[in-house]
Amino acid sequence: MTGNWLWQAPVFARGGTMLNADETKVAFDGPEGQAAIRTLARIVTEGNTPNLDQPASRAAFAAGKTGIHIASTSDLNKITQMIDSKFKLKTIAFPDVIAPKGRLPAGGNVVMITAKDKVKSDASWEVVKFWTGPKGAAIMAETTGYIPPNKLANDVYLKDFYVRNPNNYTAVKQLPLLTGWYAFPGENGLKITDVLKDHMNSIFSGARAKDPDAVLADMATDVQKLLPKSVGASK
């Protein structure tokens, strides 16, 4: 459960940012990041949450062995089917969006057309338009639980579906809070996300769950070292 989204989301929800405006210095170690890291630690120290991968955490929740499941909306329909009638499932909006500028990062997917042949590329474009259009987005929502970014899909095609499935509508109500996914600058961008995951995992594994502020300080130091030095030197 230590994906990059799980760090960006609680920081952004409180109005924080990953880096400063010119992307030369870590900014997630301020009050917003402190609140975020302490909340994540409480999940372990007060919630006794086990450190499980996604398939295992999904199975544990569906079996009633854990009380809360934090996951992508794409998990919703699968989880609903796994639970069946064992207990009542209730979805809630992402907590802690309390700051006036609080937002949530929108992680998602991309479609790329690589065909050079005009006939194939034209046909592919028609498919892409369907996938990303209101009808295709509605089908995606009904079969997975993903949030359609398409207003027509939500307001027209899925109107009755949401009445029957209110759990699916919870995330849709937070669409106005969405902001762009943050990608760290420079050639070490992917390394930085690994650093975030490693430090967060030290909390979820229980190794440093009682020392969240120190984890945050180490995380900030390690990320700062991986930022482009040429950018910082030129400012």
Image (cartoon, helix red, strand yellow):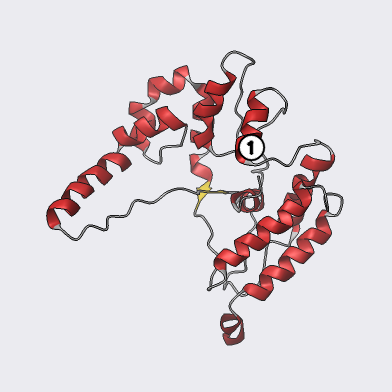
* Crowd band around label 1 with a 10 angstrom C-alpha radius: few (<14), some (14–19), many (20+): some
Residue at coordinates 63% horizontally, 25% vertically from top-left? 62
Callout 1: SS: loop
Q: Residue furthest top?
A: 85
Can you say which quadrant of the picture contains the C terminus?
A: bottom right
Q: Where is residue 161 in the image (x, y as percent from the top left)?
A: 41, 21
Tell me how many marks there are.
Answer: 1
Q: Nearer the viewer, residue 127 or 14?
A: 127
Q: Which of 14 and 108 is in front in this view?
A: 108
Q: Position of residue 148 (x, y in %)?
A: 41, 37
Q: Nearer the viewer, residue 100 or 51?
A: 51
Residue 232, quarter of the rendered image:
bottom right
The answer to whether 175 is drawn above or below residue 229 in the figure is: above
Is residue 102 rendered to the left or right of residue 175?
right
Is residue 21 rendered to the left or right of residue 219?
left
Q: Residue furthest bottom?
A: 234
Q: Which of 104 and 202 is in front in this view?
A: 202
Residue at coordinates 52% horizontally, 21% vertically from top-left? 81
**Would you name the residue on which mark 1 appears?**
70
Can you say which quadrant of the picture contains the N terminus?
A: top right
Regarding residue 147, the answer to whether it shows in the image is yes
Q: Residue furthest left?
A: 119
Is residue 208 rendered to the left or right of residue 96?
right
Regarding residue 18, the answer to whether it shows in the image is no
Q: Where is residue 29 in the image (x, y as percent from the top left)?
A: 73, 62
Residue 153, quarter of the rendered image:
top left
Residue at coordinates 67% horizontally, 59% vertically from top-left? 196
Q: Position of residue 38 (x, y in %)?
A: 79, 49
Q: Which amino acid does label 1 sit on?
A: Ile
